[in-house]
Image (cartoon, grey):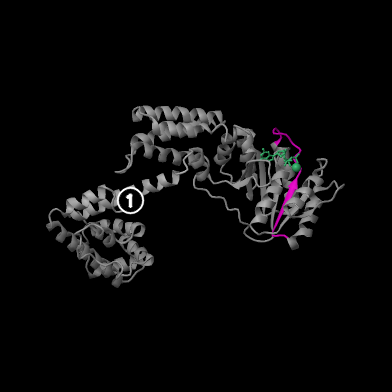
Amino acid sequence: MPGLDSIKEAVRKFLRSTSTYEKAVNEFIRDLQRALLSADVNVRLVFQLTKSIRERALKEKPPPGASRREWFIKIVYEELAKIFGGDRVPETEPPYKPYIVMLVGVQGSGKTTTAAKLAYYYKKKGYRVGLVAADTYRPGAYDQLRQLAEKVGASFYGEPGSKDPVAIARRGVEELKGRSDIIIIDTAGRHGYGSEAALLEEMKQISDAVKPDEVVLVMDAAMGQKAYDLAKRFHEATPIGSIIVTKLDGTAKGGGALSAVAATGATLKFVGTGEKIEEIEPFRPRSFVGRLLGMGDIEALLERMKSLEETAELQKTVEDMLSGRMNMRTIYHQIKQIRRLGPLRKVLQMIPGFSLALPDEDRLGMTEKKMERWLAIINSMTYEELDKPEIIDKRRIRRIAIGSGTTPEEVKELLDYYKQIKRAMKQLKRKKGLLAKLQRQLEAGGLG
Ligand SMILES: Nc1nc2c(ncn2[C@@H]2O[C@H](COP(=O)(O)OP(=O)(O)OP(=O)(O)O)[C@@H](O)[C@H]2O)c(=O)[nH]1
Ligand SMILES: [Mg+2]
């Protein structure tokens, strides 16, 4: 996307650069700021973003095995994704049928095109789609939508010559609802950028009459950060509203529009990326940012960083166990790790010579449910009990069971598990050399 396209280049430069880390970071941040500002992203937003990137870059230490530069790219990715909506993944499936969608937006924003695009998108997913032409202002609006409906194979309703959009919308829904899963109503966009209030008022009138399940505001990406005000008021006025940003292909200001919409908290569902009927896609901030960074393998990088982090955590747990610092908190972390990495015994078995009398998690039936319950049990222990599980007697067992909604038998089973691990660790400490071996293996990331 023009405007943000230079971010790719900045990433490549950063990863290739032979200057010091600090210098390369500064240079990258300057490039990033320039790219975002040229894409009309709000200055304050750019400033906040680069501030948090810089702070994290200074503070965070990459896990062993990861370079600082790789870690930095991960930080940039996460922070950038935040300004475009973060983890949000839009729900595009209609929750029930028939689902009535009404498109609104200023003149020329792309409503009619988007109505056809949505019809195409949902047809392809197997839904029956109906289109209603409720634009009575624009000459030729009826024909435009009728032709598009024919092209994508959607049902169509319109009344050429009629001047009452509310009545058309109502009759259109009535007419199409028996043979459509989704009904999309195209409306007129008579007002310029300035008269948001008038646009919202008109939208309210039709929507009061038709009672759509969703009102969609269609916005032209060329609005850049100006999209903020309209999106915000729309968001506040319409609890059932979502937004589609069109013409991302045609402007350098798309980054500004997308980040502005995200900043209002409104749901950005789709983006339009061209004039053709199939040029629409659900907006996913994370994959959008992945593409901006130009790293086809950004997923691979993130995966690797995650696994290195987990290995480092595992190492810490094992070190704790070996150093005798082991207590119930260690078990807590260990259970959480088992859920991600698999049984500790299996992980440790990958190290030659590491055959120990460790509890067999498979035999124990370490199911998800059991781990859930064990974690609940641990959560019900006092600090004193966590640090020194040996003090847990019959009375305490009963209390913990009640507190965690489990049974005394389960609490006992967990305490047995703890004792077995502790015994195994003592035994291990006596075997000199093994510890160093384990350490080396962990550092090499050889457990993944
Ligand atoms: N490049 C590009 N052009 C688009 C996109 N969406 C719509 N357009 C173009 O924008 C112009 C206006 O689109 P319409 O769908 O007629 O807009 P409208 O909101 O229905 O306009 P009115 O009914 O007059 O309010 C047309 O030339 C479309 O081809 C897009 O995602 N990319
Ligand atoms: Mg139109």
Does the magenta-highlighted stretch encompass residue 193?
Answer: yes
What's under tag 1, amino acid-wise?
Answer: Glu
Q: Image quarter for residue 13?
A: top left
Residue 107: x and y in percent read 73, 37
* Image spot of residue 14 (x, y percent): 41, 32
Q: Is residue 267 left or right of residue 437?
A: right
Q: Give the range drawn in magenta.
A: 180-195
Q: In which quarter of the image is the N terminus?
A: top right
Structural crowding at the residue carrying mark 1, measured as other residues with C-alpha within 10 Å and reported as few (<14), some (14–19) or many (≥20): some
Q: Which residue is drawn at 59% across and 32% down?
A: 252
Q: Can residue 358 be seen in this view?
A: yes
Front residue (pair 161, 280): 280
Give the residue drawn at x 34%, y 64%: 371
The quadrant of the picture showing ligand 1 is top right
SS state under label 1: helix
- Tell me if residue 103 is in the magenta stretch: no
Q: Where is residue 420 in the image (x, y as percent from the top left)?
A: 21, 65
Q: Tell me if residue 325 comes above or below residue 357 in the rendering.
A: above
Q: Residue furthest right?
A: 161
Q: Mark 1 points at which residue?
A: 310
